[in-house]
Image (spheres, helix red, strand yellow):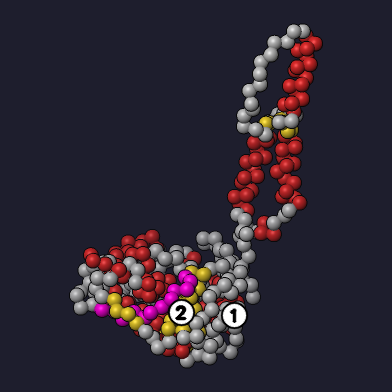
Amino acid sequence: MTINLSAMKAVIHILLASFALLPLGSSFSLHATTSPRPIRVSSSLSELKSDNDALDSEREKDYISRREAIAACVTPLVLFPLTSWAGETPPENYDCLLDLPPLPEDQVRVYLCRHGQTENNRLRKVQGARVDPPINTNGIIQAQNAGKALSKASPCPQIFFCSDLQRARLTAEQASFQINPKIVPKPSSLLREVDFGPVAEGQPVATAKAGMEATYAAWAVGNVDYRPSGGGESGREVLYRAVESVEYLVKKAENSPNRCIGAVSHSTFIRILVGVLLDEPLVKAATRKIENCSITVLDFPKGFKTQELGPKDKLLGGLLSRAPSDFMLDVPICTVVRTNENRHLPEIRPGELLPSRA
């Protein structure tokens, strides 16, 4: 069980502050209300005193002192400490892939990872297909953690592929090294990030966001031949490349010793690829969280079996789609086992740069 330490601390502080407001020696009732007591007329002062003493004794059963109340709250925390309180966040879990379902005999598995963090990521700057920074210290740690998690997976990938951009290649090298230092990742331009053109590249996300969203929105309603201002890929090109990349990876997995491979790509491309496989609206796929070095697990039938998506399928807006009537996409049949597995990743606050662990 995971405990949110910050929330628990807040509750304790509120309780202690509430008790502190009571004057020393004061007490409070354990009951929200007390039952009404019958009114009786006493015949003498001694009888009245006796009645009051009895009433006070009865009330004492319903009240505890401030010190007793604090002790009641704090004692369980001392006697039953929780190991998860050692830090604000749970530890990095390299066993996070052990609960995956077994790979069926007639299928292959692709572990698709996003690259590790770069300085552009940390500083919230756009990096598409034209800006090619390396991963930073955070990204190296993330990639190593991904490799440690994959090393425990069953089956465990012994072959790796990656985008031909260096942030993906460096991530694949760091991850695969945790499994076998002799693995050499193979680059492929099919796994590149979506090219949104030169206008957005290197710009702060806040500045470039509107233009990128306009491009994505055009594709999401079926304008598959729309191209970003200044150049870049059209929606049709991205969708065809997504399908082609899957076909490439599935064939490589079929030829691997244990029917699985690892691959490193990019956030927007992974979102679109998963959206294609699920035939979900691109507007929904755009909101899918794909963190740096998260792992998405995909199972495919052997033989690369496909189903046809037409211009009016969910992917491009359904009945309201503006896709050309002749637009068709042969989409691989796939079981999306898991997306954005991130339990192996370190906690990194926005803008934070972790010290090297080397």
Please tell me which residue lies in front, 17 or 52.
Answer: 52
Mark 1 Cα shell of 10 Å, populated few (<14), some (14-19), many (≥20): many
In the image, what residue type sits under mark 1? Ser
Residue 178 visible at all: yes
Helix, strand or loop at disc 2? strand
Query: Residue 299 got which mark?
Result: 2
Residues shaded magenta: 328-339
Please tell me which residue lies in front, 106 or 122.
Answer: 106
- Residue 70 against residue 50 in the figure, above or below: below
State the image coordinates of residue 315 (x, y, percent, origin top left): 31, 70
Q: How many marks?
A: 2
Q: In the image, is residue 146 part of the stretch drawn in magenta?
A: no
State the image coordinates of residue 243 (x, y, percent, origin top left): 35, 81
Q: Residue furthest top?
A: 44
- Given contact means CB atoms under 8 Å apart, are the residues at marks 1 and 2 in contact? no
Q: Residue at x 58, y 74 (%)?
A: 98
Q: Residue furthest left?
A: 325
Q: Residue at x 61, y 51 (%)?
A: 6
Q: Main secondary structure of the magenta part?
A: strand
Residue 185 visible at all: no
- In-image side of 218 versus 71 (left or right): left
Q: CA distance from mark 1 to mark 2?
A: 18 Å
In the image, what residue type sits under mark 2? Asp
State the image coordinates of residue 307 (x, y, percent, origin top left): 32, 80
- Residue 1 against residue 47 in the figure, above or below: below
Q: Quadrant of the C terminus?
A: bottom right
The residue carrying mark 1 is 151
Please tell me which residue lies in front, 320 or 236.
Answer: 320
Q: In the image, is residue 333 part of the stretch drawn in magenta?
A: yes
